[in-house]
Amino acid sequence: MNKVTLITVFFNLFFFLNLQAQIPEVAEDISPLLIGESIPNLNLENTEGESVSFYSQIKEKNTVLVFYRGGWCPYCNQHLAELGEIEKEILDLGYKILAISPDAVTGLEATGAKNEIKYQLLSDADGEFSKAIGIAFKAPERYEKRLFRVSDGKNNGFLPVPSVFVLNTSGEILFEYVNPNYKKRMSGNMLLSVLEVLKEEN
């Protein structure tokens, strides 16, 4: 490979990485993965602080994947608690719940205890997972200091749009609910109805 070609390759790589790092300014401009596409297999942190691959967490059972803004968000806590109340019904339908936020591991523990959560919480503190799925956007300035603090300094100013994805064990999206209005969440009853339909179809 000659010098000119090498420079061109590095320039293209830099441009691609820079493009990937860009996220929408507002929640309404996100472009999430669609039904039929597959969630990428990136690493996340569990409540023990261990790095785990996403696919290792979903390989045994279809999954309800929930993204929330953080344990500091009252709407998120209400939604997480509601999911906890219907977790047995979700399990009985053959699914498990995973919930992911930009909170660091210590924040996950506090959120789990506060909402009496039994299902698994995972940390995406640097936002690489949310960005890869297309649900990350630039956080309003008023949130930046808080997000930096609760992520142990890893959050560079992003928020995930609160979302619910239903996945099979291969990571394929079977259903999704993505609403830029963080005050609007998918109800537990609606989720159960969706899971029942999906179970019948599959």
Image (spheres, rainbow, N blue to C red):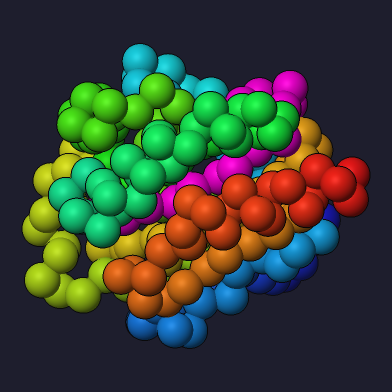
Answer with the quarter of the image where residue 159 lies.
bottom left
194, above or below 21, in the image: above
- Quadrant for the C terminus in the image: top right
Query: Residue 142's spot in the image, x, y percent?
Result: 10, 71
Instruction: Say which of 117 and 16 sits in front.
Output: 117
Based on the picture, tell me whether residue 113 belongs to the magenta stretch.
no
Based on the picture, tell me whether residue 58 belongs to the magenta stretch.
yes
Q: Residue at x 48, y 84 (%)?
A: 29
- Quadrant for the N terminus in the image: bottom right
Side of 137 relative to 199 (left or right) = left
Instruction: Say which of 45 and 99 sits in front.
Output: 99
Residue 169 visible to an observer of this rendering: yes
Instruction: Say which of 119 and 173 sits in front.
Output: 119
115, above or below 72, in the image: above
Residues rendered magenta in the picture: 56-70
Side of 126 relative to 95 (left or right) = left
Query: Residue 182's spot in the image, x, y percent?
Result: 33, 69
Query: Residue 128's spot in the image, x, y percent?
Result: 48, 50
Side of 178 relative to 200 (left or right) = left
Side of 36 relative to 142 (left or right) = right
Query: Residue 54's spot in the image, x, y percent?
Result: 60, 33
State the count of labels.
Answer: 0
Instruction: Say which of 185 and 5 sits in front.
Output: 185
Q: Residue at x 25, y 34 (%)?
A: 115
Q: Residue at x 47, y 73 (%)?
A: 179
Residue 130 visible to an observer of this rendering: no
108, above or below 145, in the image: above
Q: Residue at x 22, y 25 (%)?
A: 113
54, above or below 1, in the image: above
